[in-house]
Image (cartoon, grey):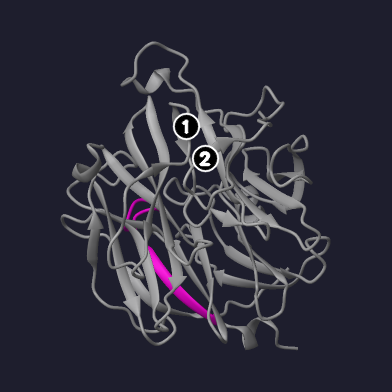
């Protein structure tokens, strides 16, 4: 299927000396009309997930066309941690902004925390852990949601240790388990849901990794997760995330790369952004892209039953695109995503923000 590439880049943050990686962020609207974007800025020499990263912010006062320079919010030293990254932003029930991010203290303890801001992101309160049990957990950027009931839902992947060492890579089991964490008091306390799942295949090395979730019009929760089985898997909950169906393959073909989905407030349609399978299957992909190209989008007007209006956000073969954050302005959608290329030596090192007008997505 031929897809037209649409949108234009409003911010490009390439790696550089002393700044080996810029990645994974999230947007939120402020009450004064500005946009706030918060992301992970790596400092030093290492671009790896356990490298030194700070949480930084930028503002836009023109709908995401122009952006201010960085301001640092917090550092690993503030948490006695190795690394902090993978930001989600959410307007909470009392009007506060919730800033969620992973705090990595080691293989034995990597968990999601939330801090609140009552002054539109100028200052942030005390840490609250969203995952009560100790362990290595992953929660992607831009993933935490608030249901119509007010409940907060965190989709997470858990990685167990299969050896005694807490520092040796060989002790880490890369097959992710799927879990969900819930809060019914606006993020002040958290508990694990009743269901957890593994991928029932001895051939999978990924398990059920990097899940996301959305609430459908009838209140059903629909979650998806990346796998190495050629597609995103999906699961459903009819009780607000307490219990979940057995995960099965979805209609989204995909390499082992995350999908992102949100509802367009102006139309009520669902927008999905992901990497489809063809380029991954039909060519020998370069190591730095991991098959994460092209980056495409599609619209569903029937709560995910069918998809149409396919478009390409990025098509370059020698780049990789992943970890997309989605945000809607009055007349466009903003996408923030990793966009590393051959020169960067990894698809994770370069951050890009693109703006796509609704008129281009919905044009006849």
The residue identified by callout 1 is 132
| Mark 2, other Cα within 10 Å: few <14 / some 14–19 / many ≥20 | many
198 to 190, vertically: above or below: above
- State the residue at coordinates (66%, 52%): 277
With 317 as the anchor, is 180 left or right in this view? right
With 330 as the anchor, is 199 left or right in this view? right
Q: Looking at the image, which is closer to me, 243 or 186? A: 186
Identify the element where label 1 is drawn.
loop
Residue 347: in magenta span: yes
Using the rendered view, name the quadrant where residue 309 is placed.
Answer: bottom right
Q: Quadrant of the N terminus?
A: bottom right
Across and down, in percent, residue 132 comes to: 47, 32
118 to 183, vertically: above or below: below
- State the residue at coordinates (53%, 53%): 144
With 244 as the anchor, is 10 left or right in this view? left
Q: Earlier in the sequence, mark 2 or mark 1?
A: 1
Magenta residues (range) = 343-356
Q: Quadrant of the C terminus?
A: bottom right
- State the residue at coordinates (70%, 57%): 215
Across and down, in percent, residue 15 comes to: 26, 60
Using the rendered view, name the quadrant where residue 16 is placed.
Answer: bottom left
- State the residue at coordinates (31%, 46%): 84
For marks 2 and 1, give the CA distance: 7 Å
Q: Looking at the image, which is closer to me, 15 or 226? A: 226
80 to 312, vertically: above or below: above
Q: Are marks 2 and 1 in contact (CB under 8 Å)?
A: yes
The residue identified by callout 2 is 190
């Amino acid at each position: 299927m031929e897809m037209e590439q649409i949108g234009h880049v409003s911010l490009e943050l390439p790696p550089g000396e002393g700044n080996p990686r810029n990645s994974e962020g999230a947007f939120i609207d402020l009450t004064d009309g500005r946009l706030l974007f918060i992301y992970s800025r790596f400092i030093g020499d290492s671009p790896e997930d356990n490298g030194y990263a700070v949480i930084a912010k930028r503002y836009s006062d023109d709908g995401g066309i122009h952006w201010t320079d960085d301001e640092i919010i917090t550092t690993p030293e503030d948490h006695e941690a190795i690394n902090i990254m993978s930001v989600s932003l959410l307007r909470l029930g009392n009007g506060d902004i919730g800033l969620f991010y992973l705090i990595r203290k080691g293989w034995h303890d990597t968990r999601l925390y939330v801090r609140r801001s009552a002054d539109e992101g100028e200052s942030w309160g005390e840490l609250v852990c969203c995952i009560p049990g100790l362990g290595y957990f992953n929660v992607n950027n831009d993933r935490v949601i608030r249901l119509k009931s007010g409940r907060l839902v965190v989709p997470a992947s858990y990685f167990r240790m299969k050896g005694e060492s807490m520092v040796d890579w060989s002790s880490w089991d890369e097959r992710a388990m799927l879990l969900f964490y819930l809060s019914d008091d606006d993020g002040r306390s958290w508990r694990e849901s009743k269901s957890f799942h593994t991928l029932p295949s001895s051939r999978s090395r990924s398990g059920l990794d990097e899940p996301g979730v959305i609430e459908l019009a009838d209140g059903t929760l629909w979650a998806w997760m990346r796998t190495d089985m050629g597609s995103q898997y999906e699961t459903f909950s009819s009780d607000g995330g307490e219990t979940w169906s057995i995960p099965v393959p979805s209609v989204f073909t995909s390499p082992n790369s995350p999908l992102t989905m949100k509802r367009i407030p102006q139309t009520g349609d669902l927008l999905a952004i992901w990497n489809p399978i063809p380029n991954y299957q039909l060519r020998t992909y370069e190591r730095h892209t991991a098959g994460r190209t092209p980056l495409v989008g599609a619209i569903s007007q029937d709560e995910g039953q069918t998809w149409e209006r396919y478009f390409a956000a990025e098509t370059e073969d020698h780049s990789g695109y992943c970890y997309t954050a989605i945000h809607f302005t009055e007349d466009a959608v903003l996408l923030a995503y990793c966009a590393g290329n051959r020169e960067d030596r990894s698809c994770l090192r370069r951050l890009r923000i693109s703006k796509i007008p609704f008129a281009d997505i919905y044009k006849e």
